[in-house]
Amino acid sequence: MKNIVEIKNFRMDFGNKTIIKDLSFDVRAGEIFGFLGANGSGKTTTLRALLGFYTPTSGELLIDGKPYDAEDTNVAVGYLPEERGLYRKETVMDNLIYFGELKGLKDPRGWAEKYLKRVKLEDKADLKLEKLSGGQQQKIQLGVTIMNNPKLLILDEPTKGFDPMNRRLLMEIIEEAHQKGAAIIMITHYMDEVEKLCDRAILLKDGKAHAYGTISEIKKAHNGKSLEQIFIDVYGGEDE
Amino acid sequence: MNKTLWIVTKFEFIRQVKKPSFWATILLIPAMVIGVFAISMLAGGKAAEPTLDENTKIVITDEAGIMPKENPMVAKVSKDEGRKKVVDGEADLYFYIPADFKDTKKVEFFHVSEGLELFNMDGQLIKVILKQALSSKYSDIEVAALTGDFEVTDNKLTKTGAESNALGKAIIPGVILVLFFFFVTLFGGRLLMTVVEEKENRISEMILTSVSAKHLIIGKIISMMMLGVIQMLALIIPLAAALVIYRDNPMVSQILSTIEIDPLAITENIILFIFSAFLTTGFLTYIGAITPTAKDASQFIGPVIIGVVFPLYFMSSFMATEPNGLVYFLTYFPLSAPTALMLRSTFGTLTTPELIIGLAEIIILSVIVIRFTVRTFQKNAINFGFAKPKLLTRSKK
């Protein structure tokens, strides 16, 4: 299967501090890939470097064979960052239309209306975003992330802070994107999500890949333990 | 225009236009201008007739024969001789009443003036003089008919006798300079805030996966330029309307008769305005790119605006025919260059080579500043503290 993401010998230093020492992995087209590690292990840094926000100290981070450029790529990318944020003073609809236009949607308003109905926020379309609750804003942001049917979906803790009902709704939406052929890189601390959804995963530790492969390969290498137990064993005793 | 750039420009333009604060700012200035204008009109109306100072040496040529011959101001001199008397200092003011005055209702007024005085009401003295002089010769009705509405052509002369209309030539380029100040003060800060907002509200990380930092920043700058055009129209249209409506007012008619179109200075200032707007907004955008919050950014707006208006503190140096060292320094110092160049163009002391060098400097600096801003914004989009130089360095490959 074709690799949609390739990370080769990636190293990232901030001043004297090394966040990532030497990291290599790939993500295949159409798979769901779990990106795991404790807080501060460098997961978000790696994704930000992949999207060009950081210049790597060394190594290569490629999407579809080349460094990512938002306006010069054949691969539609959807990114849901850990830090949530849209135009708070603009309406929900205006936010969705703006991003829809930027992502090349033919009928951004029509798409927005359908999506708002899907996530039960159709009555909030004309409200300023800041009037919505955190969870509601997160749904809007997820909509922005998936609106252009991305071939690569990068989700940094997508279900963080969600109640079980909305978490299920979001997972359904993500699963739909996967069914449409999107490769998904997902950072999450919910190991049940990883076991249920992911084809493969990588576990970061000390700036390197501690474990990397299919979920069953990782489990096999750790005496068949659950991912949650593996996580606890790897980071056990460390102060997160 | 690139489609993405257009989408960003349109979004930024519409969201600013929708804000009540935008219209409040836009309409406040014309309202103030009209208010000041109206007050001036009222004040001007009350003091329409200047008083005759006995120390003022006045000479009148009366070819129409309407003045009493015994009036000491009336002299048998030709228009050229009268004009020479003013230049030689033998007369302070010279009035020429042509033979066809009763038909044309026109009087010519000559005086020495090399400065930028606008409201020299001495030309209106002829009305006072005529009223006083004619009252002994004509009936009240005839005096009223003769001294009613007539036009006084103001001829300003230099001490060498050349025609002087430095002010008239400076008015339109000066208005362009004023519009530049309005643009920088009103929209520079607004632009800076829209850039900071991207980071403060954590939008940048999301949006930069859909649009390049270059198109995002340039789109914001272009939208501000478009808003600037609205602001200028909001200022110019009421002002022009006021001038037309009050065109018969002595003060307004004097302004209108004083205005002289200087195509070179006007073109220079328009070109300088456009590129200077890019440079100044580029500086402010850069501040937005390196600061994490609107509060942090706001403290930098003042120094930039002071830098832009700094040349105004040395207005007298800029008005001098021979520029001094300070004027040259301010002409080429990046922040003050736009104002200094426009001031010198306004007062006619900017040579073509200096204009070319100054304009080249502004264009090159604009490109550098905007490119640097784009790169800084891209690299600091997710740096929610002050920008650090290390983030701008290239990777060690």
Image (cartoon, coloured by chain):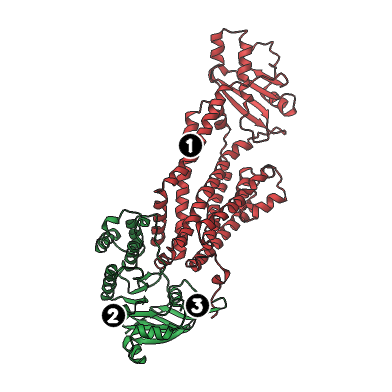
Chain colours: A green, B red
Circles 2, 3 touching at the beta carbon (< 8 Å)? no
Q: Please determine if labels 2 and 3 lie on a single subunit.
A: yes
Task: Please tell me whether mark 1 sits on a helix, a strand or a loop.
Answer: helix
Residue at position x 67%, y 45% from top? B314
Comparing labels 2 and 3, the label whose residue is closer to the camera? 2
Disc on the earlier residue, 2 or 3 = 3
Given the current orientation, which residue lies at the most extreme front position?
A237
List x then y, in percent, for residue A15: 56, 76
Q: Mark 2 — residue? A: A196
In the image, residue B204 sits, relative to residue A126, either above or below, namely: below
What is the chain identity of the residue bearing mark 2? A
Residue at position x 44%, y 53% from top? B223
In the image, residue A93 sits, relative to residue A4, either above or below, namely: above
Res A124 → quadrant: bottom left
Q: Mark 1 — residue? A: B31
Given residues B273 and B393, the one toward you in this image is B393
List x then y, in percent, for residue B36: 53, 33
Task: Please tell me whether mark 3 sits on a helix, a strand or a loop.
Answer: loop
Q: Please determine if labels 3 and 1 lie on a single subunit.
A: no
Q: How far apart are marks 2 and 1 (CA)?
A: 66 Å
Circle 3 Cα neighbour tier, 10 Å, few/some/many (<14 / 14–19 / ≥20): many
Circle 1 Cα neighbour tier, 10 Å, few/some/many (<14 / 14–19 / ≥20): some
Res B45 → quadrant: top right
* The C terminus of chain A sits in image quarter: bottom left
In the image, residue A61 sits, relative to residue B93, either above or below, namely: below
Residue type (three-letter) at the residue carrying disc 2: Lys
Q: Mark 3 — residue? A: A56
Given residues B66 and B308, the one toward you in this image is B308
The number of numbered badges drawn on the structure is 3
Q: Distance between the residues labelled 2 and 3?
A: 32 Å
Res B175 → quadrant: top right
